[in-house]
Amino acid sequence: MKDRSLLMIPGPIEFEPEVMTALGMPTTSHVAPDFIEAFGRALETMREVWLAPNGQPFVIAGSGTLAMELAGANLIEPGDRALVLSTGVFGDRFEDLLTRHGAEVTVLRAPLGCIVPHEDIEDALAKGSYKLLTVTHVDTSTAVRMPIEAIGMLCRRYNVLSVVDGVCSVAGEEIRQEEWGLDVVLTASQKAIGVPPGLALLVASQRAMDAFSARKTPVRSYYADWAKWLPIMTAYVARKPSYFGTPAVNLIAALDVGLQQLAAEGMPARFSRHERLAAAFRAGVDVLGLTHVAEDGDYRANMLTACRYPKGIDAASLLPEIKRAGVIVAGGLHPDIKSEYFRVGHMGAVRPGDILAALGALESGLADCGYVFEPGVSLAAAVRQL
Ligand code: PMP
């Protein structure tokens, strides 16, 4: 029987059929005219999606961690000082990564489920001479969303490069890279961008590119060196073939289709759709009496929801029952509370019906586990929001 489960994890997500068709087309040469057009158009459309009309886009085969590494490898030289804002597992990953590239790293780590307070960031920037700050916009391990607009402004004031890990936010949460003065906004293909895993994507500001050009030492990674990739990106935008490492031809063809769909929806409409669907899902879980890992309602992400299991229920009892009801959700990720919560992704191609299906499956799973509630309450609460 065909597996018709609905994938509602925080990436990879459900992909649009047109994207999958593009992925399955016969592979062309990376210098074929159609591919040159698709790659050039995809790079141009990234500027629209990132709201960074003057930004420098990069598309390189690899996962989101490569996108993080591109920022670290190209902007850090040994001995540079970096400030990492951590709201979970992926903030901590940046500490590790930047240290590997020789940075002297200071971490401002938020208590679990909270944001790093603005005053603490300002205080650290005022006291230290940092070259670069990293912030995880939405940490997928906690569903905490950091207020990156204010952080971008702070970084400009203190002349610090801002790097936003937008793996779990780009193309879903509001980001206006140029207006908000953000220097690098990075992501991967498999989340709200809506393309199967395998592409690292980022857009860099002119300030970031100038900082890269002013390096005194060569980039320590051969594959990640912007000096290798910048001429390639420039050539494809100018609709000329070029080669450094073989591009992921089929994934880039699929990316082009996915990005055209995003641009057609329009970024403001896309941001508000994510906000509306997330509000509906949260209304459903709230009325069921579940509590969130992200403590403050203002900082709960629109891309995913992270909820604690009710007393007496755990991953092994609930998640298979939700799956049996036709929806796949994810377990916990943060090592301190891994067994205490689960995560539901609602990003990208997600529709109102998917929100209702996820809540229906959650209710069905909770009922099977003996949790007591009035059947249908979460659906009614969500429908009121939709
Ligand atoms: N940052 C965030 C916020 C993420 O959610 C993830 C992946 N879940 C990554 C970085 C790393 O991306 P990848 O798994 O594609 O390497």
Image: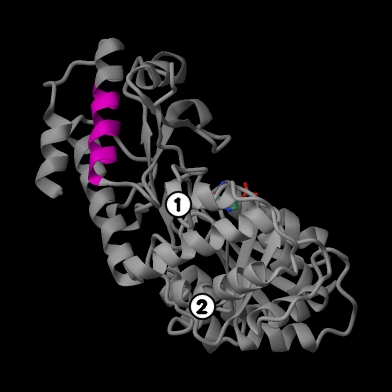
The residues tagged by marks 2 and 1 sit, at their Cα atoms, a distance apart of: 22 Å
Does 152 appear above or below 267? below
Q: Which mark is residue 171?
A: none
Q: Position of residue 212 (x, y in %)?
A: 76, 82
Helix, strand or loop: magenta stretch: helix
Q: Relative to residue 180, is residue 103 drawn left or right?
A: right
State the quadrant of the N terminus.
top left
Magenta-tinted stretch: 352-363
- Where in the figure is residue 91, as x and y percent of width and height? 59, 55
Marked residue nearer the N-terminal end (2 or 1): 1
Residue 255 appears in the figure: yes
What residue do we see at 62% from left, 82% from top? 160
At label 1, which amino acid type do we have?
Answer: Glu
Cβ–Cβ below 8 Å for labels 2 and 1? no
Q: Magenta stretch containing residue 207, yes or no?
A: no
Q: Tag 2: residue type?
A: Arg
Q: Can you tell which mark lies on residue 18?
A: 1
Quadrant for residue 76, please give it. Answer: bottom right
Along the horizontal axis of the image, is 84 left or right of 167? right
Q: Is residue 199 above or below residue 46?
A: above
Say which of 383 and 143 sits in front: 383
Q: Residues within 10 Å of mark 1 (few under 14, many from 20)?
A: few
Q: Position of residue 364 (x, y in %)?
A: 26, 19
**Secondary structure at numbered mark 1:** helix
Label number found at residue 47 = 2
Residue 307: quarter of image: top left
Crowdedness of circle 2 by 10 Å Cα count: few (<14), some, many (20+)? Answer: some
